[in-house]
Amino acid sequence: MAVSFDLFDTLVSVPRPEDTPEAIAAELDARDVPVPVDWEAAGREAAAAIDATEGEEVSITTYVTRALATRDVHPEERVIESAVLAAFDRPVETRDGAVEAVTAAGSRGSVGVLSNCSVSGLVERTLQRSAIDLNGLDAIVSSADLGWRKPHERAFQAIAAGLDVSLTDLIHVGDDPYDDGGAGDVGATAVLLGDVPLAELPTYLEARGK
């Protein structure tokens, strides 16, 4: 048995920027990247031109790169990635019961994190700033790196492979009935926080292991 956890709103709480385009623009400006005066319009044009299939992840870095390109601005990709990551850099609060839940899962098998996140590097930075022991995680899969979002089967296949189990031996824990609940549609077991709160997960896993 292996357990994967959703990250945001499951293990941690992290506020989003109040105005994402404005936050990104400020970070680009801080890195001497010329921000178009019609920044939001450029963003809409870029978004309209991206043809992603259902479940495919398109990183915010990609959107920003294409938005700038519509106005003939072409900074290095690493500069854009740094600006986007900084725009989403917010305080991290580890949710009650999260540490105990991860520890309990790790005591019974491999454990990992499977997160829908459009910002490259944000999952890793968030985990580093949380109270979760990174050494206790056997695999971390972010949609920004993988290219697929939950509930697409490829997302659950990736974390199952990282934890060296089949989908039928994977328990996925999360808060979202659609994204996380989709684990049940691909052969894994979905455990939603609305049904089993984090504080009760150790008892749930113990009962499953008997």
Image (cartoon, grey):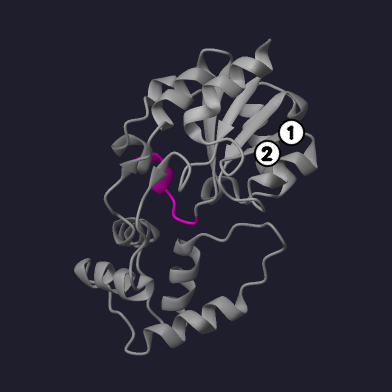
Q: Earlier in the sequence, mark 2 or mark 1?
A: 2
Q: Which residue is mark 2?
A: 156
Spot occupied by residue 28 in the image (x, y as percentages of width and height): 28, 69
Residue 31, relative to residue 135: is it above or below? below
As for residue 124 lying within the magenta part, the answer is: yes
As for residue 35 lying within the magenta part, the answer is: no
Q: Amino acid at mark 1?
A: Ala
Disc 1 secondary structure class: loop
Taking the image as drawn, is residue 163 in sight? no
Spot occupied by residue 143 in the image (x, y as percentages of width and height): 56, 48
Q: Nearer the viewer, residue 172 or 192?
A: 192
| Residue name at image x 37 percent, y 89 percent | 38
In the rendered structure, which segment of residues is drawn in magenta? 118-125
Disc 2 secondary structure class: helix
| Residue name at image x 26 percent, y 50 percent | 91
Residue 122, relative to residue 132: is it above or below? below
Taking the image as drawn, is residue 142 in sight? yes
Residue 119 as seen in the image, left or right of residue 190 = left
Q: Residues within 10 Å of mark 2 (few under 14, many from 20)?
A: many
| Residue name at image x 79 percent, y 35 percent | 187
| Residue name at image x 66 percent, y 29 percent | 171
Q: Kindly identify which numbered label has been placed on residue 188.
A: 1
Residue 181 picture quarter: top right
Q: Amino acid at mark 2?
A: Phe
Spot occupied by residue 195 in the image (x, y as percentages of width and height): 61, 40
Spot occupied by residue 173 in the image (x, y as percentages of width and height): 59, 36
Position of the C terminus by quadrant: top right
Are dots 2 and 1 in contact, CB under 8 Å?
A: yes
Position of the N terminus by quadrant: top right
Residue 176, relative to residue 64: is it above or below? above
Residue 204 as seen in the image, left or right of residue 199 = right
